[in-house]
């Protein structure tokens, strides 16, 4: 597959991602308790609509259609955002979950645009790279605004009553919570052997090397001279 084919594939992925967000952001805005966060989602919705149009312009430059691939990655990120919206938490704690979901979304897009811009530049597609850079800059600024809003939200959340999910009896957990907990344990089990190997290697690197007989002899000689 030539680089141009890879670029087209990646751009279609981004086009699908942005279209999914056009439908997801209104739900985030409606659910947010913080006025700053709510307004931020509304503003970024309008930016996202513009990004979709900009991507269509990119495809016009390339003489290709924008559809053809569904972005599975963004579908998963949007699903996580919906899970945050479904949480029954106090206002600031609820918004903290939305902040996490929103930042994952922005950084997913930022990574995608960086890759597409790099490919476009190598292929000499200056107009395409310029259009993509506009989208990238909006995503970076959106992430910064979310981080700025998060400071007050996180601080307020520290004043809210803590709920210990781990101590909640199984009878009180939803089917979704139980499934998620089961999958989490499976994730840990599948990776445990590899993590253990890495952990052992990391410990051996950080541990001080045992002294050799020559080093011990040298130390004794230094002590003798000092005496």
Image: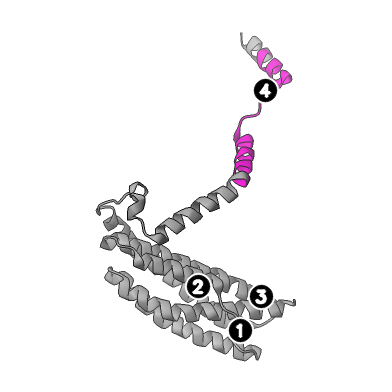
Residue 71 drawn at (x, y percent): 56, 75
Specify the principal SS of the magenta part: helix
Residue lying at the far front of the rendered structure: 171
Q: Is residue 45 left or right of residue 214?
A: left
Query: CA–CA distance between discs 4 and 1?
Result: 63 Å
Few, some or many residues within 10 Å of mark 3 (<14, 14–19, 20+):
some
Inspect the magenta stretch and tell me whether residue 207 lies in it.
yes
Q: Which residue is mark 4?
A: 211
Residue 209 drawn at (x, y percent): 65, 29
- Screen quadrant of the C terminus: top right
Q: Is residue 54 above or below residue 97?
A: below
Q: Examine the rendering and report whether any part of residue 138 can be seen.
A: yes
Query: CA–CA distance between discs 3 and 4?
Result: 52 Å
Q: Is residue 225 left or right of residue 79?
A: right
Q: Which mark is residue 75?
A: 2
Magenta-highlighted residues: 194-220
Few, some or many residues within 10 Å of mark 2 (<14, 14–19, 20+):
some
Residue pictured at 31% horizontal, 75% vertical:
30
Q: Which mark is residue 68?
A: 1
Q: Which residue is mark 3?
A: 119
- Foreground: 212 or 182? 182
């Amino acid at each position: 597959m030539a680089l141009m084919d890879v670029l087209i594939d990646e751009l279609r992925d981004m086009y699908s991602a942005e279209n999914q967000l056009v439908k997801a952001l209104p739900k985030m805005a409606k659910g947010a308790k913080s006025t700053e966060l709510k307004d931020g989602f509304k503003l970024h919705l309008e930016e996202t609509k513009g990004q979709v149009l900009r991507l269509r312009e990119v495809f016009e430059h390339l003489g290709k259609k924008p559809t053809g691939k569904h972005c599975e990655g963004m579908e998963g990120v949007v699903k996580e955002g919906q899970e945050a919206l479904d949480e029954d938490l106090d206002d600031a704690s609820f918004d903290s979950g939305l902040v996490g979901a929103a930042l994952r979304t922005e950084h997913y897009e930022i990574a995608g645009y960086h890759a597409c811009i790099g490919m476009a530049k190598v292929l000499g597609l200056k107009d395409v790279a310029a259009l993509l850079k506009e989208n990238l800059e909006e995503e970076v600024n959106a992430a910064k605004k979310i981080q700025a809003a998060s400071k007050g939200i996180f601080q307020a959340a520290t004043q809210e009553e803590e709920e210990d999910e781990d101590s909640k009896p199984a009878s009180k957990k939803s089917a979704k919570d139980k499934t998620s907990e089961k999958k989490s344990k499976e994730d840990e089990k599948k990776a445990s052997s590899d993590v253990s190997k890495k952990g052992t290697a990391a410990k051996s690197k950080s541990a001080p090397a045992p002294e050799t007989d020559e080093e011990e002899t040298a130390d004794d000689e230094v002590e003798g001279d000092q005496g």
